[in-house]
Amino acid sequence: MGNLSSVNNVNLIIASLGGSPQPVILSVAANHPDRIIFLSSHDTVKLSADVLGALDFQPEVEYEIVDNPNLLSECYQKCRLCIDRAEKHGYLPDQILVDYTGGTKVMTAALLLASIGKHFQFNYVGGKQRDKDGVGVVLNGHEKFFNEMSPWIVFAEEERRKVATLFNSRRYYSVIEIIDSLNMGRVPVKIMRYFKTLRQVSDGLLNWDQFNIKKAYELISQGMVMLEEHCQLYKQSDLTDFSAQVKGMVVRLQEILKKTKGLTIPHTLLIDDLLNNARRKIADKRNDDAAARIYRALELYGQLCFLQVTGSENDSVDPDIVPEKIRDDYIRRYLDRSSGTLKLPLQATFNFLECKGHGAGIRFKQQLKKIKNIQSNRNKSILAHGLAPVSDGAVKSIFNTVADFVQFNNSYDFPLLP
């Protein structure tokens, strides 16, 4: 609960008038603004003289008069004009105080609605002792400032719901933008911690979705610590399951970095990551992005199998290790004369493996028709060599074919907020 001390650094007050002028006098006297914008009706405008007459200084004064103080649409329009006036004076948002103590219920409701998205300071003057058997105005000398009764408490909760919806739709950049736009100085501590933690995790998942694995691991690890602290502070938090999911993501990222030696060597976990990324893109109706990831998973699978068989990469192959029956053809078609090595594309890689009796090469030959359909769909994509988008049916067929071919069985989803 507040007291009668001033709010920090107030240069302008927007004050609704109605009822007793005493609360407004106290608010203005405590904050000593350079300017006041009074929101009043024709009947209550005279109260501004009582307010100004009680001050030992003379602020600049402006007025917005409401013709019908019980009509919400009209009150809201006048409140918007008050805010426009205030902002045109060039003050920073936190140098503007909205005092919504006086006026009709409709006027105060409209003032809050009009200013709820702004980063202003807010104040309400109330108290326990009132006239009319406790239901009238606050008795003089018993007023208290309620600075914490800011609509930011409601606004922050609405923003929390909004970012949760965006987060669960994997729109992490939008989540980050909304949280960065909030004035955390106005947000209750619990919700502030929630937003800061969620921003950290969102940034990590955004980086993971963009294959920045190392950065994702760093950010999500930090987010996990923040989540655990949040759950410890607020025992009734509904984030316990979410925290466990985030911890699972950290373990998964850690495993990827370990098995790939910091992303310096290929591993089947990267194939899993590509296909899970593709699953998210399919769910988000980003079929061309999904097709590119699926095709890359197929390529990477071939590269990994080739490395296991030969100990070398398929883009720098010694011609002497190529089976004799295909060697001349490979030299003619794939030789890089500057290096003297072979650079093998996808089909040539799997043909090599088939000649070596490797299971992946044998399966490739058996499923060659399906694989060629994948290549055709990928090449027709506007993100490859064509002009047409990949259809829903095509991308699902591509995914199922490649998932079966590479023996994909490690599907996982990003965490969802309650």
Image (cartoon, rainbow, N blue to C red):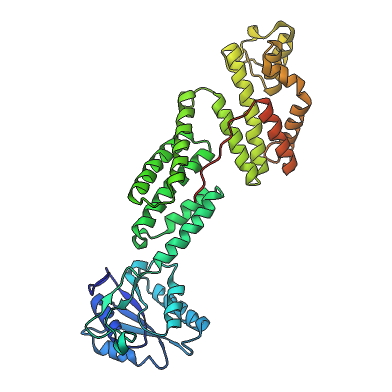
Q: Classify residue 309 by image quadrant.
A: top right
Asked if residue 199 lies left or right of residue 5, the reply is right
Task: Count numbered badges in the picture.
Answer: 0
The picture places residue 181, in percent across and down from the top left corner, at 43, 58
Q: Tell me: residue 312, above or below residue 235.
A: above
Spot occupied by residue 274 in the image (x, y as percentages of width and height): 59, 33
Front residue of 266/318: it is 266
* 248 to 67, vertically: above or below: above
- Can residue 391 be seen here? The reply is no
Q: Nearer the viewer, residue 382 or 219?
A: 219
Residue 398 makes an appearance in the image:
yes
In this rendering, the answer to whether 200 lies above or below 80 is above
User: Is 99 placed above or below 253 here?
Assistant: below
Q: Residue at x 68, y 10 (%)?
A: 356
Q: Residue 55's x, y, as percent? A: 23, 85
Residue at 64 percent across and 26 percent down: it is: 407
Quadrant position of the N terminus in the picture: bottom left
